[in-house]
Structures are given as C-alpha cells and as structure tokens.
Image: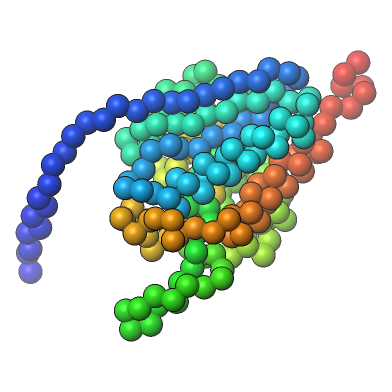
C-alpha cells in the first residue's frame, strides 16, 4: 500500500575546491586522484583514500624519477563528481599518461560480526568493496589484489559510482580505482573506530604493485628513445 516519507531538516550550500599539483619531469605522466568531500566525519570513506593518496604521492616522487606526476584532490564529489569533471581539462593527455590511479572510498574498513544487534570487531577488512580497472590494467590488478577480501574480483569501471567513470570517459585507457561500501557508509558512524592502518597498508601496496607492473611493461626501449 502507498506510504509517505517526511524528511525534516535544513539545506545549505557550501563552497569547495579542487587541489591539484604537477611535477614535470619525463614525457610520461602518472596521475593520482582522490575525493576530498563526504558525509559527516567520513573517516573511512575519505580518510583511507586520503592516506593512500599521500603515501602513493610521496612514494612515486622517489620511485619513478622518469615520470611526471599529476595529483588531484577533488571537491564536489556529491554533485556527480563535478570537481573531477572540471579538473580533467587540465590533466595530462591520455596518450601521455602511463596510468591513472584513483584512490576511492573506504579502501579498508574494519569488519565486524553482528549477533543479535550487537557488533564485535574483527581483525579483518570489510569485504564489501571492489576493484575497478580498465582492460589494460585488469591482469596486473588481479595479481596485485589477490588475497585481499572483496578486491580479488576485478571488474570494468562502473559509470556513475566514482570519479573513475569520468576519467575513463575522457580516454584514459589505463585506469584503476577501489570503492568500498561498508556498514557505516554515509552515516555518522563513520568515525575513527572504523579504520586501522594495518588493514590499509596491504591495499596501498597493491596499488603500488599495479603501477610497478605497468611501468615495467611500458618502459621505453633504447630503440624507442633513439
């Protein structure tokens, strides 16, 4: 039978912005991105992606002196990824981009056992997460994320669920993103109790392994340089 839902609250408009940086070195680019806006505290949703983003940026600077870097921290995530759409016009051309790694939402969140309405912490990560990669990165992603609950299944990027859709639509053929949807997603329960650095570390290492693989596979030969 029909029902009516009444929602009482206030709406307001807040300003947001994109943060982006470039480090120009070689002709090929590595692009790293993550959203910066979310609901409530969004510690797991945004905190894990931000931590991974910063770790990978610091690592890439030292690890790949031959690559230029494009770093993007987007605002307006909730407005159909408006920040990403605006920033992509300033990103390196797809043909010049080795890979685009998007550090998405809730990369690693503490799992819990629920019994009779009570939750008990587990030493493992919530498996309700997925790895999305374009065809050229899927084999490397399957190898890198093997053994990480939920992330072993690598699928093509899904339109409309992450900035990765906008990235792929612009022609970036080597693109990767992880997206998690844990119990606390978009709720006030997404606080510090949801995260554990020990659960995030292997996910960051898996992202790094994908970049290592594609860098090795696409490294220019002496004939290419000549």
Horizontal side, residue 31 vs residue 90: left or right:
right
Residue at the extreme front of the image, as rendered: 192
Residue at the spot x=71%, y=40% of the render? 211
Residue at the spot x=92%, y=22% of the render? 223
**Residue 215 in picture, x, y percent from top left:** 77, 36
Residue at the extreme bottom of the image, as rendered: 116
* Quadrant assignment for the C terminus: top right
**Residue 204 in picture, x, y percent from top left:** 64, 49
Horizontal side, residue 162 vs residue 143: left or right:
left
Residue at the spot x=57%, y=28% of the render? 71
- Between 189 and 135, the residue placed more toward the observer is 189
- Between 23 and 78, the residue placed more toward the observer is 23
Horizontal side, residue 223 vs residue 43: left or right:
right
Is any part of residue 154 visible from this angle? no
**Residue 13 in picture, x, y percent from top left:** 22, 31
Rendered image quadrant of residue 28: top right
- Between 153 and 34, the residue placed more toward the observer is 34
**Residue 121 in picture, x, y percent from top left:** 47, 72
Give the vertical position of 10 relative to 196 (above or below): above
Horizontal side, residue 99 vs residue 171: left or right:
right
Is any part of residue 122 visible from this angle? yes
């Amino acid at each position: 039978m029909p029902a009516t839902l009444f929602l009482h609250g206030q709406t307001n408009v807040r300003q947001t912005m994109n943060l982006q940086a470039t480090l120009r070195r070689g002709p090929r680019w590595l692009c790293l991105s993550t959203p910066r806006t979310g609901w409530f505290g969004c510690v797991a949703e945004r905190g894990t992606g931000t931590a991974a983003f910063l770790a990978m940026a610091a690592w890439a600077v030292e690890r790949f002196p031959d690559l230029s870097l494009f770093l993007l921290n987007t605002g307006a995530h909730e407005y159909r990824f408006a920040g990403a759409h605006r920033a992509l016009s300033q990103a390196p051309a797809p043909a010049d981009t080795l890979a685009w790694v998007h550090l998405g939402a809730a990369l690693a969140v503490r799992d819990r056992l629920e019994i009779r309405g009570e939750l008990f912490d587990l030493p493992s990560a919530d498996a309700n997460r997925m790895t999305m990669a374009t065809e050229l990165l899927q084999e490397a992603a399957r190898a890198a994320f093997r053994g990480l609950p939920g992330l072993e299944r690598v699928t093509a990027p899904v339109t409309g669920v992450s900035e990765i859709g906008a990235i792929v639509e612009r022609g970036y053929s080597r693109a990767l993103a992880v997206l998690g949807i844990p119990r606390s997603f978009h709720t006030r329960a997404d606080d510090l109790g949801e995260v554990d650095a020990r659960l995030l570390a292997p996910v960051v290492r898996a992202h790094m392994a994908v970049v290592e693989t594609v860098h090795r596979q696409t490294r220019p030969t002496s004939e290419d340089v000549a």
